Image: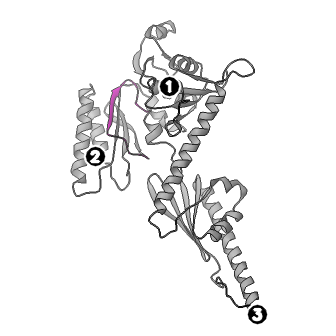
Amino acid sequence: MDLAFLHPLYEHPGPWASAYVDAPRPTEDASHERHLAAVAVARELSTQGADEETCVAVREALQEVRQSSEPHGRAVFARAGEVVLALPLSRSPDGSVVRWAPLPHTAPLLELAGEEPVCVVACVDRKGADLELRGSLGREDAGTVTGRQWPVHRTSTGDWSERHFQLRVENTWEHNAAEIADALAVCQEETGADLLILVGDEREKRSVRERLPKRLHDMVVEAAHGAGSRLLDEDVEHTRAEHVRLRAERELERFLAARAPGDDGRPGAVEGVPALVEAAREHRIGELLIRPDGPDAHREVWVGEDPDQLAVRRTDLKILGEQNSWSARADDALIRSAVATGAAALSVTPALGDEAPVGGLGALLRWT
């Protein structure tokens, strides 16, 4: 996950209010439920020590959440009476998350607002295709491909004229498949879609797939159910979830391989809070791997005003020359350092296993 969008959160000192809430269900009482949820979050922030102006700003921002535009809810980050960043979530939180702390609580974003795959769903037939763009925030029409309309059906007779007609049918199918493939390639390039999902008869899907550029072949998935099936939505969501899982598994495999010492005798990956803190101070983290429920994620570290001012012990910061220090969660402190140095971050929850980073925190290094 590219963390550049979090830069505004680290241009101002804390403390920070962080809140993650689900969107209200589309009922007659949705407005009232939204108001009650926003008031409850503001009350919790006040209990944790937040100033009244910041509580009001967060409450007002959460009261604007609409299920139609933000179906999975919103994350809000505020300080000094001002909302600095508000983001739609791509997954609903498991209950509201509310924190008042020296650093913004950004770690949940890796799961709740991560880089969810975008799909182009192409419902293909012999005459063309309907394209639809699907992502975490819903779906939208992506256009229609209209190929040659005649002739498209075979006959079963055997004289020369009918065989000639069948050849023209084959030519029409091939032409239309090429038109659909071209449109899909353009749509993928313009939208940056991660997946192309083909829906239709087996022959039609195969014809389109064969005509796609080679660079897109690994992105293509053929849906098991047709456009009229109520199970198609499940096919699409399963495909998207599988894409996320495989991506996490690939990064985890890179991490596990890099833990072994290289030619210089040093590993290309580290895990555990002390090693990560040292790597962050030296700007060596290339990608953070975080398991949000890992015991090290909420382990206490100490931070100063600058992103590379962090330590396992408060006295270590004083040795480094930092006079002001605050207690913070390890995951939030490491994410702040990653943002400052242009590193990426990824939740490895979809690829969980016995070999996940020890304690739930690890990193691939830029250099050893």
Residue at 66 percent across and 66 percent down: it is 206
Circle 1 crowding by C-alpha within 10 Å: few under 14, some 14–19, many from 20: many
Q: Position of residue 293 (x, y in %)?
A: 43, 30
Quadrant of the frame with the C terminus: top right
Q: Which image quadrant is residue 119 in? A: bottom right
Q: Nearer the viewer, mark 3 or mark 2?
A: 3
- The way the protein has been coloured in the rendering is one colour
Q: Which mark is residue 63?
A: 2
Q: Which mark is residue 159?
A: 3
Of the image marks 1 and 3, the number of the one nearer the N terminus: 3
Instruction: Using the numbered discs, state the Cα–Cα distance from disc 3 to disc 2 in whole angstroms.
Output: 72 Å
Q: Which mark is residue 241?
A: none
Amino acid carrying mark 1 in the image: Leu
> Mark 1 touching mark 3, by CB under 8 A?
no
Does residue 194 sit above or below 171 in this rendering? above
Q: Position of residue 125 (x, y in %)?
A: 59, 74
Amino acid carrying mark 2 in the image: Gln
Instruction: Using the numbered discs, state the Cα–Cα distance from disc 1 to disc 3 in whole angstroms.
Output: 75 Å
Q: Which mark is residue 334?
A: 1
Residue at 54 percent across and 27 percent down: it is 357
In the rendered image, residue 301 lying in the magenta stretch gets the answer: no
Instruction: Using the numbered discs, state the Cα–Cα distance from disc 1 to disc 2 in whole angstroms.
Output: 31 Å
Secondary element under disc 2, as helix, strand or loop, is loop
Does residue 203 sit above or below 72 in this rendering? below
Of the image marks 1 and 2, the number of the one nearer the N terminus: 2
Q: Which image quadrant is residue 29 in? A: bottom left
Magenta segment boundaries in residue numbering? 90-106
Secondary element under disc 1, as helix, strand or loop, is helix
Q: Position of residue 309 (x, y in %)?
A: 50, 17
